Amino acid sequence: MNVPEYYDYLTAAREQLWNFLRALPVDDLNRDLIPGDRFKNIKDLLLHVIDFEDHWIHGVARGANGYLDQDYRHDWRIPHAEQYDLAWILSYGRSVQAETRRFLATQPNLDSEVALISDDPEVSTVSLDQLLWNVMTHEVRHTAQIALLIRMLGHTPPWLDYLRFTRPKALR
Ligand code: NI
């Protein structure tokens, strides 16, 4: 399993999740169920996952090359995402996903070091591979939270396990 393969899985799982969310009542997507300051509802988590990918891959790793935040302005810290239509959030998601796929198609060197603090690269670096896995596992963890919120709202979340999306091997 490598980064492009896992990103393909995330893309397929996202499609199912996004289609499922489109069919939910808007009030459910906006309902504050999580106590705390930042992310309270399904839309908050959805926007946060997209923002995180945009920020880390296209903002940090690529030095703002391909960064889409300027086209989808929002408060990344406390998004209050109930103010946005689901279609707007998903449009941002599709744009970031397309940009990530373009980037991965260039076959970037995954061993290259990425500076985490741009004004002092000596302080902290990670490999591009580590950064991409951080982004991808971040999505999986927050998707589990979204699935829990879906349950709490009385619905059955889509089944998004990896094995569901892998091509079965033929028996010998
Ligand atoms: Ni997070």
Image (cartoon, rainbow, N blue to C red):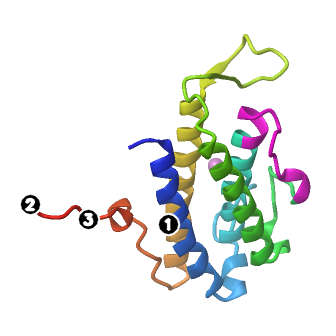
Q: Which residue is mark 1?
A: 13
The Cα atoms of the two marked residues, 3 and 1, are separated by 17 Å
Q: Quadrant of the C terminus?
A: bottom left
Q: Is residue 32 left or right of residue 105?
A: right
Q: Nearer the viewer, residue 1 or 80?
A: 1
The Cα atoms of the two marked residues, 2 and 1, are separated by 29 Å
Q: Which residue is mark 2?
A: 172
Q: Which residue is mark 3?
A: 168
Q: Which residues are magenta?
A: 58-71
Q: Nearer the viewer, residue 152 or 75?
A: 75
Q: How far across and how far down the image is residue 30, in percent?
A: 73, 77
Does dot 1 land on a helix, a strand or a loop? helix
Q: Is residue 47 above or below residue 22?
A: above
Q: How far across and how far down the image is residue 106, in percent?
A: 63, 40
Disc 3 beta carbon < 8 A from ligand 1? no
In this view of the protein, can residue 19 be seen by the observer?
Answer: yes
Q: Quadrant of the N terminus?
A: top left
